[in-house]
Amino acid sequence: MAARRVVIGVGNEYRRDDGFGPRVLAELTARRDGDHRLDGVELRVSDGEPSRMLQAWTGAALAVVVDVAAGGGTGWCEVCLPEDAGPAAPATSGHSIGLGDTIRLARALDRLPCRLVALVAYGHEFGFGTGLSAPVAATIRPVTERICDLVAAP
């Protein structure tokens, strides 16, 4: 039996660049039939609420979280967690509680996956509406390819 792997796309598709995570999950879903690397991989969309995040990744050998962060430059980055969970976020983020706080909660409850990787695009437009900014849309393909490589690795 293969180890459980889950990809979680975090965000709100009606808040412009915040829809990056759900958009990447849609791309993975479209690829699923033609890309054997995605066989058996759970694909989930989340609003980032901590209890749902913990439920999605508990017991997984690998959890990949796809999200967007405000600021920074352009492109995307890969962060291995929980070592790089970062400082506690103020409760004013788009997700109410940030990923770092969710990781700290998971650690306290012993509900971290064996391996947790975050792929984060640098977003710039978070107003109401659908559609990603051009720089964020340009990261969909490389992030999707990286996810396929991560879930296929032994």
Image (spheres, grey):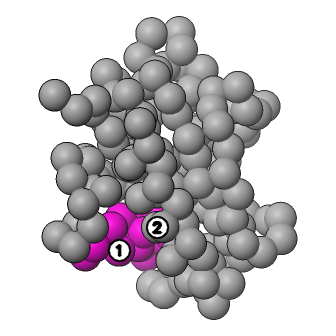
For residue 97, side relative to residue 45 (left or right)? right
Answer whether residue 29 is magenta in the image: yes
Most foreground residue, 151 or 55: 151
**Residue bearing mark 2:** 144
Q: Is residue 38 above or below residue 62?
A: below
90 sits to left or right of 45? right
Residue 58 lies, with reference to residue 93, above or below; the image says: above
Q: Quadrant of residue 24?
A: bottom left
Around disc 1, counting alpha carbons within 10 Å, would you say few (fewer than 14), some (14 to 19), or many (20 or more)?
some
Q: Is residue 15 visible?
A: no
Q: Find the magenta span and give its range.
A: 11-31
- What residue is shown at x 60% (from left), y 20% (from top)? 104
Find residue 27 and name its label.
1
Q: Main secondary structure of the magenta part?
A: helix
Q: Amino acid at mark 1?
A: Glu
- Res 74 seen here: yes
Sequence-wise first label, 2 or 1: 1
Q: Position of residue 111 (x, y in %)?
A: 41, 17
Tag 1, which secondary structure? helix
The amino acid sitting under disc 2 is Thr
Residue 40 x %, y %: 19, 47
Quarter of the figure with the C terminus: top left
Asked if labels 1 and 2 touch by Cβ distance under 8 angstroms, the answer is: yes
